[in-house]
Amino acid sequence: MLKPFLNSSIFLCIAIFVTTAQASIYDKTTCNNANVYEDIDCLGQENKQFINDLNIIYNTIKTTKVSVDEASVPSSEYLKSFNESQTAWNKFTTANCQMLNLPYASLQGGGIGLVNGACWNNAYRSRVNELNSWMAELQEK
């Protein structure tokens, strides 16, 4: 008799967690249209801009030389480090967004696209901000 209650309680907890996770991921974006498909398009456009920003950072790193204690660090070392970092970041973000999307995998409609777009949007925004801060520090040296 207690077993059906436990199953429904577990389902309710999972449903609340999934709904909360979806809301918290999505709330961090700037795309807040009334239509889920417009939001997906908006996130796609924002993500393209973030990718463009990452390309600008990449091109800046290619030409950056930093002097630290009278020793100049060649831009090739920064570029190599950035490439390794970006590869690891991309691998982590892909796995992380897949994990966050897992509860929505069986849903129909645009829900999974919205969650995936928002996940990448937040990851790109954070990465661009992090790298811009890092670049600012490099240029100060």
Image: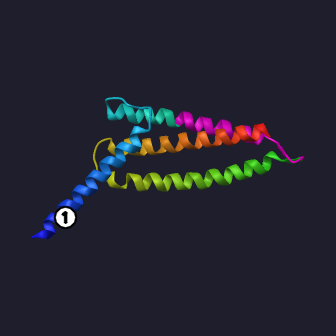
Q: Is residue 113 visible?
A: no
Q: Find the magenta span and give its range.
A: 48-70
Q: Residue at x 75, y 41 (%)?
A: 138
User: Residue 114 occupies which quadrant of the picture?
Assistant: top left
Q: Where is residue 6 drawn, in percent x and y?
A: 18, 65
Q: Residue at x 69, y 49 (%)?
A: 82
52 inside magenta stretch: yes
Q: Is residue 119 left or right of residue 74?
A: left
The image quadrant where one finds the N terminus is: bottom left
Q: Residue at x 32, y 43 (%)?
A: 111
Identify whether 18 is placed above or below 109.
below
Q: Is residue 95 left or right of residue 68?
A: left
Kindly give the residue lying farthest to the top in the view shown. Answer: 33
The residue carrying pointer 1 sits among few (fewer than 14), some (14 to 19) or many (20 or more) residues within 10 Å by Cα, namely few
Identify whether 1 is placed above or below 53.
below
Q: Where is residue 66 drawn, in percent x and y?
A: 82, 43
Residue, disc 1? 7
Give the structural element (helix, strand or loop) at label 1: helix
Magenta span: predominant SS is helix
Q: Where is residue 112 drawn, in percent x and y?
A: 35, 46
Looking at the picture, tell me which residue is in the foreground, 36 or 73.
73
Q: Amino acid at mark 1?
A: Asn
Q: Is residue 126 left or right of residue 108?
A: right
Q: Residue at x 56, y 51 (%)?
A: 90
Q: Where is residue 59 drawn, in percent x and y?
A: 71, 38
Looking at the picture, tell me which residue is in the foreground, 136 or 94.
136
Coloring basis for residues: rainbow
